Image (cartoon, rainbow, N blue to C red):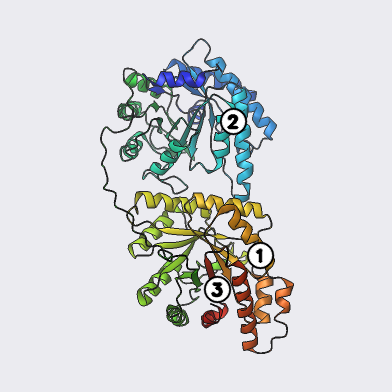
């Protein structure tokens, strides 16, 4: 790579639309039918990759993406050293194909790594850093992250590129026909966040949709930016032929018209994704070669009247008062009499908000949002349903949030959710499209695009009992970055739990409502200690219940412990989150 590869790209973009190559994967499959990813050829059959690069160059492409989209340990089942070797070979092949063409830029191509467990995120993030490091050392002019659902996993890699290389950085997302990625985020939020990132030079869309749909998505964005926008749509939509997805029809003329229309209205970098061939790129290059770039997509886009958002949060105007939240578990059947009785009792007790868990422990209860709506209508109290990621995908989540907002439910506790009990896993499947941070980002997006005049207020959970407290502190920070404005904690019973919670407060500054669960008997305490994950009950707490004989004795010990926790945390927490066993909410007035 020349020392000023990034500057050369920026200089080119001042007076030209930059045309990329087309698809490597689908074009390779149509030529060779190996049923293997083309990345396997980097080492063992490089001429096939070289020939495809040459075809795209000869048909007008100015950016050649290396054959590295799937070069990672997860997809290729390679060891990391083998991944690095494949990347080095791919970069070398692309450079050799570009020899004799001084105006060709080489872009290291990186696709998303799919993984199923949140604990693997750091491993994936670290691997992206290794991949980008190898590409920089191999002399690329640019690095393009393409077909991503969000930016969560590549932030460290982006930072690394900025620190280590003079590299032009492109981040591209894949969205569906309605403009949403697999993470449930809108194209506007994805592209805006990428453009706002200090480490990126360009952002846009690739894959997912054909040129007509991509044009329509961009047309609605109204993004103005000093950075660059990219559009690499698919040729169209594939058909299933002999159990293979094939882009059968040649619609290269239509493709070039729609892609050039996007360039004419402000897209700076255009090219092709799945189904596009060198012929597509030739027609596209011919359509844009005399165009002059513009700075934004639309000369004029609709200006929305911005009203001051209405604050419907349960904690507004409290003037420093400790907030009180009380959890009421929705019933397991259609009888809500006990819950409604408890709600009416709490209405008289100065409680700020009632919360409703979302089928905790993966066992079916009445829907938390519908239960909250009924309580709100009958009591007038502020309500806050929990919403978890276990049971619904992004489409259902957005639908549920829209319905809640229409019914004036605007406060939520966002959690990842408990797993489904093992005995029913074979018949009931969890969804978990994303964790709580992912869902918070969806709500943040909806607040910006749909609820801007009356945004949803949401918080997260703190598990101060997590073995590695640094991990939990990191999670709290991520949730705050995703828009969480308050946190409810697991129940606290002793000095150890208080100390850990204090550390979280000191390191994050989070608005914390400390969890309080007054056990009412030895049996209750023993059950929670041994049967409920995330709740840490010391032997000292258990010992305090051993002398209890009557119901009143057990309740008195629970009240006493709750008062002790409140006294020891009052200097740093913002309020308290009560969960009363067996709906014994009458204990609240003995505690506060």
- Dot 3 alpha-carbon crowd within 10 angstroms: few under 14, some 14 to 19, many 20 or more: many
Q: Position of residue 325 (x, y in %)?
A: 49, 70
549 relative to 184 in the view: left or right: right
- Dot 1 alpha-carbon crowd within 10 angstroms: few under 14, some 14 to 19, many 20 or more: some
Mark 2 and mark 3: Cα distance apart in space: 48 Å
Check the image and report above or below for 274 versus 350: above
529 relative to 477 in the view: left or right: right
Assess whether mark 1 and mark 3 are in contact (beta carbons under 8 angstroms).
no
Q: Which mark is residue 132?
A: 2
Q: Nearer the viewer, residue 245 or 311?
A: 311
Q: Which mark is residue 497?
A: 1
Give the SS element for disc 2: helix
Quarter of the image holding residue 303?
Answer: top left
Q: Nearer the viewer, mark 2 or mark 3?
A: 3
Give the SS element for disc 1: helix
Residue at figure coordinates x 42%, y 65% from the top left: 314
Quadrant housing the N terminus: top right
Q: Earlier in the sequence, mark 3 or mark 1?
A: 1
Q: Position of residue 330 (x, y in %)?
A: 48, 74
């Amino acid at each position: 790579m020349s020392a000023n590869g990034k500057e050369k790209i920026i200089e080119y973009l001042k007076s030209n639309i930059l045309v990329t190559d087309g698809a490597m994967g689908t074009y390779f499959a149509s030529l060779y039918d190996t049923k293997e990813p083309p990345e396997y050829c980097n080492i063992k059959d490089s001429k096939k990759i070289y020939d495809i690069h040459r075809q795209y160059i000869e048909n007008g492409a100015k950016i050649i993406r290396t054959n590295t989209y799937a070069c990672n340990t997860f997809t290729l089942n390679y060891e990391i050293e083998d991944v690095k070797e494949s990347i080095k070979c791919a970069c070398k092949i692309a450079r050799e194909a570009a020899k004799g063409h001084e105006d060709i830029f080489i872009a290291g191509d990186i696709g998303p790594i799919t993984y199923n467990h949140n604990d693997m995120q750091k491993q994936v993030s670290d691997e992206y850093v290794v991949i980008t490091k190898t590409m920089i050392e191999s002399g690329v002019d640019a690095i393009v992250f393409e077909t991503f659902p969000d930016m969560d996993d590549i932030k460290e890699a982006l930072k690394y590129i900025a620190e280590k290389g003079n590299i032009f950085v492109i981040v591209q997302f894949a969205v569906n026909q309605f403009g949403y990625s697999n993470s449930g985020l809108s194209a506007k939020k994805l592209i805006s966040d990428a453009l706002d990132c200090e480490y990126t030079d360009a952002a846009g869309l690739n894959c997912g949709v054909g040129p007509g749909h991509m044009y329509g998505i961009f047309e609605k964005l109204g993004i103005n930016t000093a950075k660059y926008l990219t559009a690499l749509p698919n040729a169209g939509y594939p058909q299933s032929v002999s159990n293979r997805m094939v882009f059968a029809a040649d619609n290269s003329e239509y493709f070039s018209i729609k892609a050039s229309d996007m360039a004419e209205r402000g897209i700076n970098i255009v090219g092709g994704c799945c189904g596009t061939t060198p012929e597509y790129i030739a027609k596209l290059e011919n359509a844009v070669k005399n165009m002059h770039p513009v700075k934004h997509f639309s000369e004029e886009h609709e200006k929305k009247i911005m009203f001051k958002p209405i604050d419907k949060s349960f904690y507004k105007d409290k003037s420093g008062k400790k907030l009180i939240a009380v959890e009421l578990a929705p019933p397991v059947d259609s009888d809500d009499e006990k819950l409604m009785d408890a709600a009416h009792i709490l209405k008289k007790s100065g409680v700020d908000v009632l919360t409703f868990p979302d089928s905790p422990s993966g066992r079916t209860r009445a829907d938390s949002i519908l239960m909250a709506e009924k309580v709100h209508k009958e009591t007038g109290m502020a309500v806050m349903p929990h919403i978890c990621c276990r049971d619904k995908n992004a489409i259902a989540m957005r639908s549920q949030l829209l319905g809640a907002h229409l019914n004036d439910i605007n406060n939520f506790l966002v959690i990842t959710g408990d797993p489904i009990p093992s005995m029913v896993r074979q018949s009931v499947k969890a969804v978990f499209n994303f964790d709580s941070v992912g869902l918070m980002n969806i709500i943040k997006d909806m607040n910006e695009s749909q609820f801007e005049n009356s945004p949803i207020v949401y918080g997260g959970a703190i598990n101060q009992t997590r073995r590695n407290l640094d991990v939990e502190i990191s999670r709290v920070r991520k949730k705050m970055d995703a828009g969480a404005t308050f946190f409810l904690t697991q129940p606290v019973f002793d000095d150890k739990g208080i100390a850990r919670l204090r550390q979280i407060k000191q390191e994050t500054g989070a608005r914390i409502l400390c969890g309080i669960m007054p056990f009412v008997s030895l049996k209750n305490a023993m059950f929670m200690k041994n049967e409920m994950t995330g709740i840490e009950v010391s032997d000292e707490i258990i010992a305090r219940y051993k002398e209890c004989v009557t119901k009143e004795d057990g309740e008195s010990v629970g009240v006493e412990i709750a008062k002790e926790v409140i006294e020891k945390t009052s200097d740093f927490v913002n309020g308290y989150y009560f969960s009363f066993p067996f709906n014994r909410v009458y204990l609240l007035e003995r505690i506060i």
